[in-house]
Image (cartoon, helix red, strand yellow):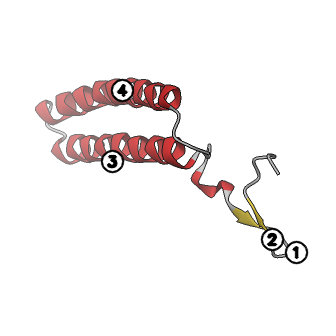
Amino acid sequence: MGFNPKDAVDAARDITTNAVEKASDIVENASDIIRGDIAGGASGIIQSSIDIATHAVDRAKEVFTGRDHPDDLDVDLDGDLDDDLGDE
């Protein structure tokens, strides 16, 4: 499957939405730091940042590979390569 610009725009929109939601979590974690829970707040900020990056990479993979999930590529018991997309 080739590159589809509409899928790329949809992925960019999804990545942005996810980042804004996670930014809200980061603000809450920053307030935890201000209240004295430095370890908990910093840990939450790091986790949210990793979640943002992971989601962005996963969505970019979907756009460029044409697969909904990175694990869609399987090997059947008969040894044939099967991408489980039903387009065979």
User: In which quadrant of the rendered view does residue 24 lie?
Assistant: top left
Dot 2 lies on which element? loop
Asked whether 49 or 60 is in front, the reply is 60
Tell me the CA gap for discs 4 and 1. 41 Å
The numbered mark at residue 80 is: 2
In the image, residue 26 lies at what x, y percent? 26, 32
- Residue displayed at 26% across by 47% down: 46
Quarter-of-image position of residue 81: bottom right
Residue 16's mark?
A: 4
From this viewpoint, which residue is outermost toward the right? 78
Q: Which residue is mark 1?
A: 78
Query: Marks 2 and 1, Cα distance to the nearest angstrom?
Result: 6 Å
Quarter holding the N terminus?
top right
Element class at badge 4: helix
Query: Disc 2 residue type?
Result: Asp
- Please tell me how crowded label 1 is: few (under 14), some (14-19), or many (20+) other residues with Cα within 10 Å: few
Query: Dots 4 and 1: beta carbons under 8 Å?
Result: no
In front: label 4 or label 3: 4
In the image, taking residue 28 as reference, residue 71 lies left or right, namely right
Mark closest to the chain's N terminus, 4 or 3? 4
Q: Are marks 1 and 3 in contact (CB under 8 Å)?
A: no
> Which numbered marker is on residue 50?
3
